[in-house]
Each structure stands twice: as structure tokens, then as C-alpha cells.
Amino acid sequence: MWMDGILSDQSKKRRRRRRRRESPFTVSARVREKKAERRKRIGVVVLVLVVLAGFGILLHVALSAAGRHFFTENDRYLIRNWDLHSNGRLLTPAHIREYSQLSEDDNLFAVDLGRVRRRLESVAVVESAEVSRRLPDTLVVRVNERMAVARLGTDDRLSLAVDREGHVLGPGSLRPNLPSVVGLRQAGLRPGMTLTDSLFVDALQFIELCERPQVSQYVRVRYIDVSDPEYLDIRLGDGERVRIARDHMEARLAELVGIVQNDQRRGRVARVINMTGEAHIPPVVQY
């Protein structure tokens, strides 16, 4: 064991003597060799990356050319047929085609279906649209129209319509016997706007509740005045005037249905039904 230690010490001494005998030029040459090897490895990596990038570009160009040849510039896929349908009464196939901004010269695969859908949904009366291809030459469009649930104002010539989400529609969306909403504080109404005023939202909620079958046969709304922040001032089909607080509306409406049912059995019509008190306070009815 002690011999191994002596030999190891001697070996270390010989290595130190060789290093002392090496000239600075030898050390410098060794450093240059290492740097050259490092540069060579980096060069190989860069070359591989350049070759891969070039291959990727060539592949992209080739695929693009093939796509144009077989799809986007292929006359087989020109739009020759239109399958256009709306679930409403306002938009005809001609309207849908006009709003899509497409023609028979367009290629089905060159058409951006998402862009066409957004164009259609930018139309005030359109709630949603679906656009798809039916190969080889048919564009398919399905449109869901917004349905008016009320009119804004009482003048038939100037009124705008509004759907259940508060989207303002043009006069063409008006239907007979829609309830009128008056007393809006927002000026400059035009199709495409969305009404978010909480007072108006309460009126839409009341109208929607009145569309339920168990309610609609008794409560027919002619107009709603939303100008008072505390209650809705409503005129019903038989002339009843109802003032109803904006809180607990569903429960209050159930009470109102009971009152109207009872009046119908007795053959009478209330002049005023006051439901503006606390929810637990019975309505005050005047005949």
C-alpha cells in the first residue's frame, strides 16, 4: 500500500515537470484547437437547422401549390348552388346571399366560413348563423332571426322592435299585438343597439313571464311604462291598470293571475290593481 502511495506521488511530480517544460506556444495551440472544434460543432448544428428550415419552406410551398391546384383554384369547387334558409319571416334567401357578400365566382375552399358567419351576425335581425360547405359546389347557410317581443313607443310608423335580450330591431320586425314599452330614458335608439337599462330589463322580464301558458290566458299586456324606478305601470288587455313593484316579480305575477281569474268568474274588470307594497302586503284592487 505504501508503495502505491510513493508511485502516485512520483507520477504527479512527473506531470508537473512536463507542464513546466511545455512552452506557451504549445498551450496556445491547444486552446486554438479546442476553439476550432467548438466552432466546427456549432457550424454543423447551424447547417442542420438551415437545411431543416429550407426543407420546411419547400414543403410549405409544395403543399400550398397542391392545395391551390386541387382545392382553392379548382373550378370543380366553384359555388354553383346555394342552400339558404332562415327560421324567421324577414330574411329571404336573396337577403342572406346579399349579406354573405359572396358570388358564384367564389371557390368553396377559398371562402372563409367564419368571416361569412360574422358578416351575417352583424345584421341586427340575425341572432346566430351557421355556414358550411356541401361538396362539390354548394354553400349551406342557416340563420336564426331575432324575434321581437315588444315595441318601443306607441307610434306604429316610428316604432322600433326589441327582442327578449334587449337587442333593438327595425320596424320590419314588428308583429301585431306586441306590447309597447314607453318611458325609456335612452335617446337615439337605432337597430343594432342593445338596451341594458335595469328599468327596461324588468319590463322584458315581466313580458317573458307573461308568455307562459298558465299566465298568458289571463294577463295580456298592452303597454308598460318603465319611467318610475320603483314599479312598472302596466295596462292589460281589458283595460286594467296594474302597478307592480320590481322585486319578487314572479310571486306578484302569480297573485295578479289569481285576481284576474277571480274577476273573470265574477264577470267584472278591475280599474286599478296596486301591487307596489311590500311582498307580504296584499294588493289593493279598485273597481
Image: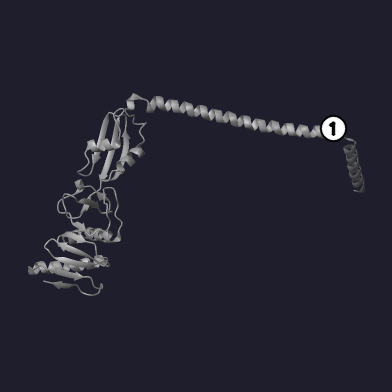
Q: Which residue is mark 1?
A: 25
Q: Is residue 155 above or below residue 76?
A: below
Residue at image point 28% right, 43% down: 123
- Quadrant of the rendered image containing residue 135: top left
Left/right placement of residue 70 relative to residue 284 reads right
Q: Residue furthest left?
A: 267
Q: Is residue 40 above or below residue 214?
A: above
Residue at image point 24% right, 63% down: 227
Comparing 254 with 235, the one in front is 235
Under mark 1, the amino acid is Phe
**How would you rate the neighbour count of disc 1 (Cα within 10 Å): few for under 14, some for 14-19, many for 20 or more?**
few
Residue 150: image x %, image y %?
21, 54
Q: Is residue 161 above or below residue 232?
A: above
Residue 231: image x %, image y %?
24, 66
- Quadrant of the rendered image containing residue 279: bottom left
Residue 110: image x %, image y %?
37, 31
Left/right placement of residue 58 relative to residue 266 reads right
Residue 161: image x %, image y %?
22, 51
The quadrant of the picture occupied by the C terminus is: bottom left
Comparing 10 with 2, the one in front is 10
Label 1: which secondary element: helix
